[in-house]
Amino acid sequence: MSERELTMAAAISEGIAQEMERDADVFVLGEDVAKYGGIFGATGGLLDKFGPERVMDTPISETAFIGAATGAAAEGMRPIVELMFVDFFGVCMDQIYNHMAKNTYMSGGNVRLPLVLTTAIGGGYNDAAQHSQCLYSLFAHTPGLKIVVPSNAYDAKGLMIQAIRDDNPVMYFFHKGIMGLPWMAYFTGSTNMVPEESYTVPFGKASIIREGSDVTLVTLSQMVQKSVIAADKLAEDGINVEIIDLRTLVPLDRETVINSVQKTGRLCIADEDYRSFGLSGEISAIVAENLDRVNLKGSVQRLAVPDVPIPYSPPLEKAVIPQVDDIESCVRSMM
């Protein structure tokens, strides 16, 4: 395969375009997805390639256009629908929670819903409490939805193509801070080499970003880049961290987590979602349920957002979202 470097935004758009070329049933709709190319660039260039009949801007009527996408999927189309921020899902939760997630079950499997719902997540640019959350754990808690959270361009394209081809509803969360946008500061590492050809990344298969023997660090999305920087600093002092990028929450690759903790005996979870009742607790429980296979050398450590709304103030926002120094300090405390 021929490769070149792409930002995550460009990789997502390319994956969508290749599937639209392959399958005439694939189309895109949502807020600012056409002329603007998506507020964070995920649908850039698609309008010029495929025209307004397959790339459609919608009004700010989330219940209406997510309901329309769900109906189109039930009729055999493969819609990709973008809702600008994950924080806005509250206004259309009935369509997601009671229709997207449940209609296949309630029809006895007779109604397929091959639908991809994309959205931007995360803080880091001071957009306050209603534009800075992650919330993927909320939807991972909802049976009937697959949850995808890429951390880099290569995975983003392959996971998007896999999502479009899936016959079940998939929620696809991209962190705005790793999309590679020129107007927004972001951590390096998310822009990487991406094949020009079409390919898939399977759901439910975590990626071992870095192998190590001292501590298992389980993470995802932008926290992957922060974890790599922290691991580089720790390696200078001989602390070898194994970093696991989960890639998808539903399905979740439990075995890779357990096998890594078997080797290291220590577990730290770094997550940008809320701490209580979330991903960090789920990963901790998975290890606790397998203590017959895992010999922990100390207590599990969790880094996540405390149970407060994300602040607007830059110093306060930085204080509540785990940073590189927080990860480094947490791992050092375990040794």
Image (cartoon, rainbow, N blue to C red):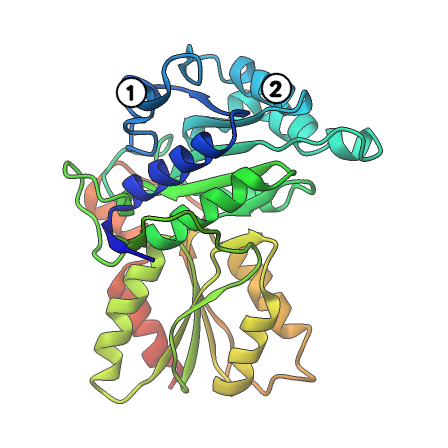
- Cα distance, mark 2 to mark 1? 23 Å
Mark 2: which secondary structure?
Answer: helix
Report how many numbered discs are placed on residues in the image.
2
Residue sitting at x 24%, y 68%: 229
Amino acid identity at mark 2: Ala
Residue sitting at x 48%, y 34%: 22
Marking on residue 48: 1
Residue sitting at x 60%, y 41%: 166
Mark 1: which secondary structure?
Answer: helix
- Circle 1 Cα neighbour tier, 10 Å, few/some/many (<14 / 14–19 / ≥20): few
**Mark 2 sits on what residue?**
72
For the residues bearing labels 2 and 1, Cβ distance under 8 angstroms = no
Marking on residue 96: none
Q: Indicate the quadrant containing the C terminus: top left, top right, bottom left or bottom right.
A: bottom left
Task: Give the image quarter of residue 68.
Answer: top right
> Closer to the camera, 333 or 79?
79
Q: Position of residue 71 (x, y in %)?
A: 64, 18
> Closer to the camera, 291 or 246?
246
Residue sitting at x 42%, y 47%: 198
Task: Give the image quarter of residue 236.
Answer: bottom left
